[in-house]
Image (cartoon, rainbow, N blue to C red):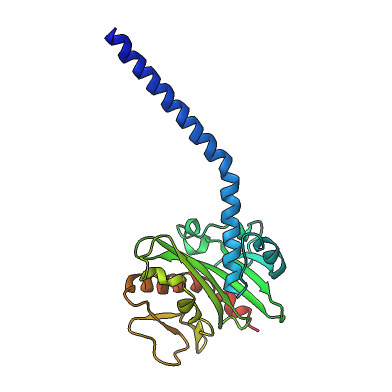
Amino acid sequence: MKNFSNRYIFIFSAVMVIFVATLLSLAATLLQPRQQRNLETEKKKSMLEAVGIISTAETAESLYEKYITESYVLDIKGNIVQGVNAFNVVLKDEQKKSPEQQNLPLFEAQLEDGKKIVIIPVEGKGLWGPIYGYVSIKSDMNTIYGVTFDHKGETPGLGAEINTTDFESMFKGLKLFEDNEFVSIRVVKGGSPPYDPHGVDAISGGTITSKGLEAMLKDCLVKYEDYFINNRN
């Protein structure tokens, strides 16, 4: 009787494990399309935010279609790569390749006042995980129009401040080039000097995240240098 009881418990446990695993697998499969749509919506919202357009989950699609007029994939020389969808490029995967093999996505926005802005995705490493965002640049291919940043797990009140309006607003109007040389943006501990066209104040207590963001901007944007130089207005 004892052996029968143990056998029953084993069989019952095995059946329950299989049943629960099947339910979880089915749920994941059914939810995957919705999760993918949510990711795409968040991506569109972030791109729009980089050019100063605030959207919601309900309005992101229509506003994206209205303002984002073109998208390209470039190579390191600034040439357009055919047959690759810029929206579907995963920067994390591209960064594992040599620079010469990377697909570099670029998006163009046209605003209500007729201004044409390019938007470039960026991704790097913070203190506790990935940091990422979008940088929008005016048609002179030098002046930052706006930025939006986010993170996976930076410390609240410290590194997580990269996605606050106060921090992001400091990037508006900064320059990527100095005397025709690409210099990117410096994130300065202790505060950027007044009127520095290439610097912003680092986050107090978030030095590692700040330096990670500085490295992210330089490493990602320098790959577009040839494109910037050849497409200035």
Q: Classify residue 230 as left or right of residue 101.
A: right
Q: Residue furthest top?
A: 1
- Location of residue 69 (image quadrant): bottom right
Residue 13: percent from the left, percent from the top? 38, 23
Question: Residue 78, can we see it?
Answer: no
Looking at the image, is 65 positioned above or below residue 181?
above
- Location of residue 110 (image quadrant): bottom right
Q: Residue at x 41, y 72 (%)?
A: 161
Question: Residue 10, can we see it?
Answer: yes
Q: Nearer the viewer, residue 92 or 7?
A: 7
Residue 65: percent from the left, percent from the top? 71, 64
Q: Nearer the viewer, residue 119 or 113?
A: 113
Looking at the image, is 187 positioned above or below residue 131?
below
Q: Quadrant of the N terminus?
A: top left
Q: Residue furthest left?
A: 2
Q: Quadrant of the C terminus?
A: bottom right
Residue 196: percent from the left, percent from the top? 44, 90
Q: Residue at x 47, y 88 (%)?
A: 197
Q: Residue at x 47, y 58 (%)?
A: 92
